[in-house]
Image (spheres, rainbow, N blue to C red):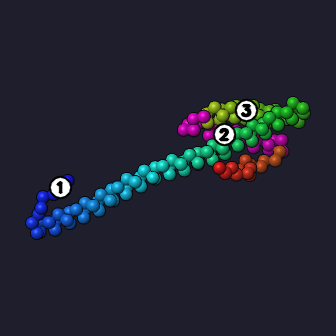
Amino acid sequence: ARRMPREGGEEAAGMFDDIVSLDDSLVRRGYDAGVRIGNVQGEEEGLQLGRLKGAEVGVRLALYGGRLEAMEVLARKHPGVFAKRATGAMEQLRSALELAEHSLLNPREQAGFDALESAESRLRTISSLLKFSQRPAEETPSLDF
């Protein structure tokens, strides 16, 4: 906008006002740019973390499911080795894994994570009853993207 010429002191005051408002304007623009950039970076970091954690959960599900399948094969081939308590715990493990697989499709619900913890507990119980190695899933190789 075009300004009207000012008299002496008014002109100096006007220049001071311009300097003060320029500073505020630059701060505001810098803040707005920082928020936009931060939102983009935050979303990217969140996606990377989500992929990593999702992969870790998937590895746990696959590991527990694989161990259960191996135990079921052993139970069929050597039924006298498996105590009834172990067989019952295997059924509970299967149920917990199925619940975890379905419930984890909505990661905002706690039920899937609770079912996964229950499956891990059942797996430990079975392994203890059958004197199997109880090496936890945390010892599996790390997944980096």
Tell me the kind of residue under disc 2: Leu
63 sits to left or right of 14: right
80 sits to left or right of 87: right
Rate crowding at label 2 as few (under 14), some (14 to 19) or many (20 or more) other CA atoms within 10 Å.
many
For residue 134, above or below residue 22: above
State whether the magenta stretch is mostly helix, strand or loop: helix
Query: Residue 52 versus residue 92: which sits nearer the camera?
Result: 52
First in sequence, mark 2 or 3: give its number: 3
Tell me the kind of residue under disc 1: Arg
Image location of residue 126, percent across then percent down? 78, 40
Image location of residue 140, percent across then percent down? 74, 50
Image location of residue 33, percent across then percent down? 40, 54
Write the residue at 63% across / 47% down: 52
Measured Cα–Cα span from mark 2 to mark 3: 11 Å
For residue 13, above or below residue 44: below
Write the residue at 60% across / 34% down: 105
Query: Residue 75 versus residue 81: which sits nearer the camera?
Result: 75
Q: Give the range drawn in magenta.
A: 105-131
Pair 1/2: label in front: 1
Residue at label 2? 116
Q: Which mark is residue 94?
A: 3
Measured Cα–Cα span from mark 3 to mark 1: 78 Å
